[in-house]
Amino acid sequence: MGIFIKLLPVAIVIPLFILFFRAEIYFPHPKESQTCNETHEPIQGDGIIDRFVQAIRIKTITKDRQVYDTSELLRFAEFLRKNFPVIYSSPLVTFETVNNYSLLYHVKGSDPSLKPYLLCSHIDVVPVELDKWDVDPFGGIIKDGNIYGRGTIDVKDTLMAIMESLQYLLKNNFQPRRSFYIAFGHDEEGMGNDGAQEIAKTFVRKGIKEFEFLLDEGMFVFSDGFPGVSRPVALVGVAEKGFLSVILRSNGTVGHSSMPTYETAITTLAKAISKFTSDAHSNFFGHGPERRMFEEFAQYASYPYKLFYSNLWMFGPILAKIMSGKPSNNALVRTTSAPTIINGGFKENVLPSEATAIINHRIHPIQSVSDVLEYDRKLINDDRIEIKIKGDYIEAHPISPYSRDSFGYETISKSIQQVFANTIVIPSIMVASTDTRWYLPFTKSVYRFSPAFLTQETTKLFHGHNERISIDNYLKVVNFYHHIMINSDRERLDPIKVKDEF
């Protein structure tokens, strides 16, 4: 017994030494950075806010797949032509309409040996519930320093910012070396079949083989939400979750409700549905970009969080459990499950012949559609429940490169750091769907980032009521794309410079 008592301090000290050694040696505060303090003259004034307000007033609503207001889409296209005359008249820019309503621009560079890049956004917005808004959602109302309206953060802000940035550069005699394309689909909110898919076919017809990188809507700069990290965090989506809806169906015996069977079709179905909680599927923390995410946090976090983030070999299971407790974080570490629609019966005194429910999954990059279906069957474990795929599904996207020598990721990171002061850039998973799925054959470097400040609370504005963006925030969106166009116009990445701090 005495030997154990003597060795006890050693048994405590050694693990502690390993934890602190990893925290300080493997994950020190970074001294290397890109030229984070470089800036370009910011774009401001000159009708930028007024044009954005006008864009919000055009009701480019997509109600469902292939259900959209064509007259409003045509009105929006004419609005762009009228308000960005320098773009449409420039000899460097070729413009075409794709499938009647989507828009495609080619900005020609002087060096054909450089692969072009692609900037994406979409014209359409989701419907609104008028009685739930405090202001007219299509009024372009400015109130308390915020611009209200459907599309202000999803995503007419990025569309208009791209146009503002390009027009500004062309006005100032910008002549790019690297060509780039700008693609605006018109039905992203309806899966993009008529818009982005047709733009992708146009690329094929043009003989475009590969883009250097692609940037579309995605995650944001969060000013809160990460314990131990006081600086803003920009999450760049390097992968995108898949999409799958399944129909669960149970059959029952028809009869009078006064003489019911032990279980009705609804009872049987309800038991199956109850198993589809948000954490029903396995936790994959550490198997995707979220591992790099926390290890990056370790460089900036205060104690004791620095110990946790730098020693995932020990604390990974604990962090995985913590991540599961918050919806926005839970979505990063697993395939999520959400029962969204249920139907059964037609009369209160008649036993239903069948009952159905729809479960919507967002698939983690480590899983496939077939993996999810197999897991669902085992989870339900009831042969009376029929499982069937509903409509189209989308496999999870592959993980794009995000190392320091990845041209697209580093260009986006540099632009973020120039516009959003003191911000940490972290690879992450895009939890919703974007048009990028149609462009996957053209590049392995696909990134999803929307350049605006948000908090965990304001993420509810997405597809929600009183959607809005602050004026200052919108100007940052514009200037981000200005930096993207400048920083992308180089042959290779800049050498890493060493600084004590930035």
Image: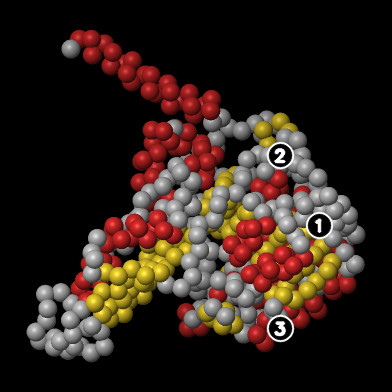
Q: Is residue 256 visible?
A: yes
Residue type, numbered disc 2: Gln
Return the x and y of residue 400 as percentages of the image width and height.
60, 49
Quadrant of the rendering where the C terminus is positioned: top right
Mark drawn on residue 179: 1
Q: Amino acid at mark 3?
A: Leu
* Residue 189 seen: no
Alpha carbon separation for disc pair 3 and 1: 27 Å
- Residue under the point 71% across and 81% down: 100
Query: Which residue is pictured at 33% across the width and 15% down the height?
Result: 10
Residue at disc 2, secondary structure = loop
Q: Residue lying farthest left?
A: 259
Residue at 33% x, 60% y is: 376
Left or right of 235: which side holds 333? Answer: left
Report the disc number at residue 34: 2
Q: Earlier in the sequence, mark 2 or mark 1?
A: 2
**Observer-nearest of 356 and 144:** 356
Q: Secondary structure at mark 1?
A: loop
Whichever of callouts 3 and 2 sits on the residue coming sooner in the sequence is 2
Q: Which residue is mark 3?
A: 74
